[in-house]
Amino acid sequence: MSLKSLWIPASLGLAALLLGSSTALAQKPSLGSAQRFAVMGGSTVTNANATTVTGHLGVSPGTAVTGFPPGILRGTLHAGDAVALKAQTDLTAAYNALAGAASTATLTGQDLGGRTLTPGVYRFAASAPLNGVLTLDAQGNRDAVFIFQIGSTLLAAINSSVELTNGAQPANVFWQVGSSATLAAGVAFNGNIVALTSITLSQGTKLAGRALARTGAVTMDTSNVFIPLLVIPPSVASPEPPKGLSLGSAQSFAVLGGSTVTSTGPTMITGDLGVSPGTAVTGLPPGTMTGTLHAGDAVALQAQTDLTAAYNALASAECTVTLTGQDLGGRTLTPGVYCFAASAPLNGVLTLDAQGNPDAVFVFQIGSTLLAAINSSVRVINGARDPNVFWQVGSSATLASGVAFRGSIIAYSSITLSQGTRVSGRALARTGAVTMDTSSVFIPATAVSY
């Protein structure tokens, strides 16, 4: 996907304002490991009341995070650890890249409120005020980039807002702030705020993007900060499989547990069944299997070793879409790597569309739990194949009664397949148990119908 967008003044009047009618390019910077942080502070992160943060939250070199709870964090907390330090290093690089971008328009001394701006790099020598509504118009280009270089403070007045039109995306909007950013009460804001010192999100603020402070504090009050979904157009090619991804000897296992494998009722397993380092397998019969049982033997041990390598390859794949805090139900997704900082819920039908490419790969990186509700399902269309769908789950996966699921579930701890579940793929647990109840698990050669 191109990270550049052509900026063309919308009218002669705007062209004069923006220093002539010459074209300009806005380059999207990389946030590196800071990409997964919704909130990052330098000294402290402080919250009052019922704030919700969807994405990681971190602080470095400081260590103090207060107000969670009552605030809710749908992600991982990194307080003064190596992950937060690396994110701050990458954040500094992004800040410098933004500050060094060639300006295409100077708005010093002017108010952003009431304006409609097209893609470009907008410069304020000092403070940038926002009183009212700022509209960012991508002109139909989903890759359009908007950069605001602000010499001192960003000040958004009460109930002001940043609105996006014609394909503009919050992920492609950047606010480089030379000192501090303050969003007053009720502000609805879009984009990534990258401030040298501090960020204040007043009562009731909503930020679709990130609040990333390099040296100072991030302060929130009943705020909502969430990393937005990046919409990928259908023309984007399928990503390559994650580097190093191979199930190795785990390929032949339909079910593999770490501690135990337990079945209730007439479960059917098509493929090998194993457990390691545990040895206990119960419920077969009345459950049936067509493959070979490996309970605590060398074959199961090697399969677990290969499974760990596959898990790590999936977990390290570069994220192309963040869905943290969103439901998979009712969506149609094209090939890509989809990331959840915490739990991934499935309520309803998820459709995976390969767009005619039988080699299309779908990877789901899930920070904690995978939770599929009763009678939910995953369906595949336009050439999508079950063997090319992977679910990397940071803790446990639970499929409720009647779920029809596709793909290989690779969970760090346990997998529960409730009564009547059907999995066209694999149920592979690294350290915990696989528990089944009148379930059906089978390794597909190609996509199957149900």
Image (tube, helix red, strand yellow):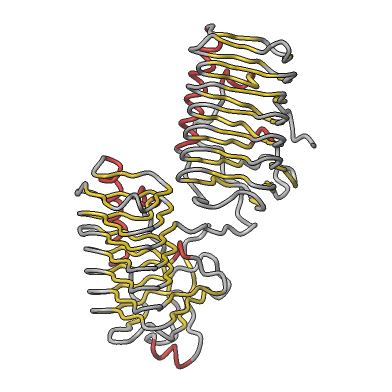
Regarding residue 321, the answer to whether it shows in the image is: no
Q: Quadrant of residue 262?
A: top right
Is 32 above or below relative to 204? above
Q: Quadrant of residue 82?
A: top left
Query: Residue 336: x percent and y percent?
Result: 57, 47
Query: Residue 139: x percent and y percent?
Result: 55, 76
**Most extreme residue toward the top, as rendered?**
297
Q: How many labels does the image show?
A: 0
Query: Residue 191: x percent and y percent?
Result: 41, 66
Give the residue drawn at x 33%, y 44%.
77
Depth check: give the residue in front, 66 or 367. Answer: 66
Q: Would residue 260 be found to the left or right of residue 80 on screen?
A: right
Depth check: give the residue in front, 238 or 50. Answer: 50
Is 362 above or below relative to 288? below
Give the residue drawn at x 40%, y 73%.
186
Q: Would residue 19 be found to the left or right of residue 257 on screen?
A: left
**Most extreme residue toward the bottom, as rendered?**
13
Give the residue drawn at x 50%, y 52%.
325
Q: Would residue 155 be found to the left or right of residue 23 on screen?
A: left
Query: Residue 176: x percent and y percent?
Result: 31, 67
Give the residue drawn at x 47%, y 21%.
431
**Most extreme residue toward the right, as rendered?**
449
Regarding residue 7, the answer to whether it shows in the image is: yes
Query: Image quadrant for the C terminus?
Result: top right
Is 374 above or below relative to 66? above
Depth check: give the residue in front, 117 or 212. Answer: 212
Depth check: give the residue in front, 298 or 47. Answer: 47
